[in-house]
Image (tube, rainbow, N blue to C red):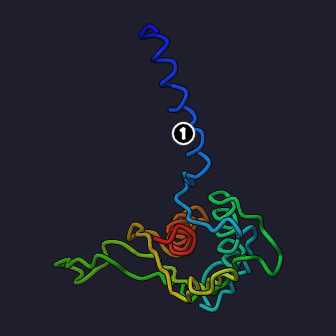
Amino acid sequence: MDWKNKKQLLLIPFFTLLFTLTGCIKYSFTGTNIDPSIKTMTIRNFENNSGEGPSFLTNLVSEEFRTYFQRNSNLKLAQDGGDIELEGQILSYNFSPAAIQNDDTRGDIAGANRLTIRLQVKYHNNKDPKQDFDQAFSSFRDFPQSQNISQIDERAIRDILERMVQDVFNRSLANW
């Protein structure tokens, strides 16, 4: 038997092993670590208990969660009784001065304004209750000192929410 034939014979066990092992490896490009028995999720509306913010804030927060979780997992959205359940409330929507600077003529002034949004999130895993949590998450964005709260657009609010939704996703499904 020549070298070419021996090489071909050695490749057969290699490919057999390779195909066998690929069925055992579970990997996700989104970094999720979801039990295969979990198929559905329920994400309830986040109520605005802050007494502040635009009228569309409740819908915006709730939809940001639904969109992100659907886009980054293979879970199907269920109205009620999902394998995992997410609910929460908007605790605060706070616009305040940031980066205080001393101006010799005007005294202390804000160099920027900061919008901070804080959410309380309850996560319940109906398949493994040890993974449940009830935790506050917050994020902020700074704006020019000349910009007031009525000038903040929906895109800016979405940017703040996106960071929090990623944090909740990482805490719940990616187990970070």
Name the residue furthest right.
79
Closer-to-camera residue (170/152)? 170
Would you place residue 17 above or below residue 174 in this image?
above
Name the residue furthest front.
1
Q: Position of residue 64 (x, y in %)?
A: 65, 67
**Pointer 1: residues within 10 angstroms few (<14), some, or many (20+)?**
few
Does the image show residue 173?
yes
Q: Position of residue 114 (x, y in %)?
A: 41, 75
Residue shown at the point (56%, 74%) measured from the top left: 172
Closer-to-camera residue (6/157)? 6
Q: On the image, which quarter does residue 89 sit in?
A: bottom right
Would you place residue 170 above or below residue 22 in this image?
below
Please state if 170 lies on the left or on the right of 56 as rendered: left
Name the residue furthest left.
104
Q: How many marks on residues? A: 1
Closer-to-camera residue (48/13)? 13
Please state if 140 lies on the left or on the right of 15 as rendered: left
The residue pinned by badge 1 equals: 17
Residue shown at the point (80%, 81%) measured from the top left: 81
Closer-to-camera residue (67/56)? 67
Q: Secondary structure at mark 1?
A: helix
Q: On the image, which quarter does residue 67 sit in?
A: bottom right
* Quadrant location of the C terminus in the rendered image: bottom left
Q: On the image, which quarter does residue 102 sit in?
A: bottom left
Q: Position of residue 97 (x, y in %)?
A: 37, 81
Residue shown at the point (64%, 85%) measured from the top left: 88
Disc 1 residue type (three-letter) = Leu
Does the image show residue 151?
no
Name the residue furthest top.
2
Q: Position of residue 87 (x, y in %)?
A: 67, 83
